[in-house]
Amino acid sequence: MDYEINIDYSVDIKKQLLKETKIILSLIYRDYLCSKEKREELLALDLEETEREEKILQKNMKLILRVEKKKMFKVKKKIKRKIYL
């Protein structure tokens, strides 16, 4: 199976790469090509970004749980009403 290269050289290469491709290339750069100091800097940035994303996820999960609890409470109320009727 032949691989067909589909690159438009008149457009910036960064605009043509998939997000996954950019991530892979950045990991190769970070882990194998850059200096030790740059690697430590990039790892610190990755850690900061991961922590930020985790906080957002936790906040979203709390909101989702709050909404689900309200739904469950309403369902329990309906069930109790039906039982007593």
Image (cartoon, helix red, strand yellow):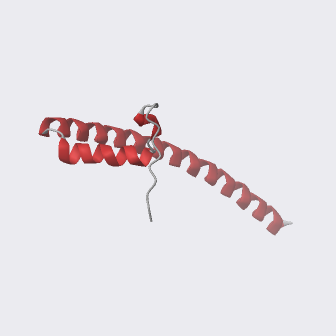
Question: Which of the 4 quarters of the picture holds residue 34?
Answer: top left
Residue that appears at 73% across and 59% down: 75
Query: Percent x, y for residue 31?
Result: 21, 47
Q: Residue at x 31, y 38 (%)?
A: 48
Quadrant for residue 51, please give it. Answer: top left
Which of these two is toward me, 14 or 30?
14
Q: Residue at x 28, y 36 (%)?
A: 45
**Residue lying farthest to the bottom in this orientation:** 83
Residue 38: give x, y in percent of width and height.
18, 35
Left or right: 52 with respect to 61?
left
Residue that appears at 29% across and 42% down: 47
Position of the N terminus, as image quadrant, is bottom left
* Total labels drawn: 0
Left or right: 4 with respect to 71? left
Q: Residue furthest right?
A: 85
Q: Nearer the viewer, residue 3 or 33?
A: 3
Which image quarter: residue 35?
A: top left
In the rendered image, residue 61, in percent from the top left (x then y), is placed at: 51, 49
**Residue nearest the viewer, comparing 40 with 54:** 40
Q: Quadrant of the C terminus?
A: bottom right
In the shown orientation, is residue 13 left or right of residue 30? right
Where is residue 46? Give x, y as percent. Answer: 30, 41
